[in-house]
Amino acid sequence: MTEQRTDRTGAPVHVALDATRGISAYTVSLDDGTLAGRADFVDPPEAAGERIFFHTEIAEEFGGRGLAGLLVREALAESIREDLTVVPVCPVFAKHLDKHGEDYKADGGRFRRPRPADLAAVKQATEGGA
């Protein structure tokens, strides 16, 4: 999955899924290939059909261009297409769903509040146990 979009400056950017590492992520890159940010997630094997988003980061030099919002919207749209329930541990995802959750559900999305087991799954993945 690679989607071309434009940021707030009108510059082309690309949002892509990077599942080549232990922790998967949606990434946003500039047209020249420079990585500008990422939204990390895990798909816990014990909770099939769920995706836990736990960290979103945009490089400081690319702040203010709306890239975090692009990442969140693309990741959520892909979660709908894959019929996944989103678990927003990341404050960026949680804030977006607090504000736009009803619209997300109306588009066919599902999400739920994080539980202790979700935090444990993130901890396991980030400590190399996944």
Image (tube, helix red, strand yellow):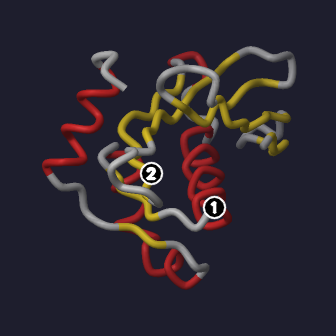
Task: Please state the total of marks drawn on the protein image.
Answer: 2
Q: Position of residue 17 (x, y in %)?
A: 68, 36
Task: Identify the residue shown where x is 58% and y is 26%.
Answer: 37
Tell me which label, 2 or 1, sits earlier in the chain: 2
Q: Residue at x 43, y 59 (%)?
A: 86
Residue lying at the far left in this picture: please name it.
116
- Residues 48 and 26: in front is 48
Q: Does 61 appear above or below 19? A: above
Which residue appears at 61% of the width and 36% of the height? 26
Locate residue 105 relative to residue 125 in the image: left or right.
right
Count neighbours of disc 1 (C-alpha within 10 A) and say few if under 14, some if 14 to 19, many if 20 or more. few
Locate residue 54 relative to residue 25 in the image: left or right.
left
Image quadrant where one finds the C terminus: top left
Residue on which disc 1 sits = 82
Looking at the image, do the residues carrying marks 2 and 1 touch, with CB atoms under 8 Å apart? Answer: yes
Q: Quadrant of the N terminus?
A: top right
On the picture, is 15 further left or further right than 107? right
- Mark 2, other Cα within 10 Å: few <14 / some 14–19 / many ≥20: many
Front-most of 75 and 95? 75
The residue positioned 34% from the left and 27% from the top of the image is 125
The image shows residue 76 at horizontal and vertical percentages of 57, 58
Q: Quadrant of residue 28?
A: top right
Q: Indicate the amino acid at tag 1.
A: Glu
Residue extending farthest to the front is 46
Spot occupied by residue 40 in the image (x, y as percentages of width and height): 47, 33
Q: Along the line of sight, which residue is nearer the eye, 71 or 128? A: 128
The location of residue 23, given as percent across then percent down, is: 47, 26
Report which residue position mark 2 lands on.
Answer: 51
Q: CA distance from mark 2 to mark 1?
A: 10 Å
Tell me the number on the disc at residue 22. Answer: none
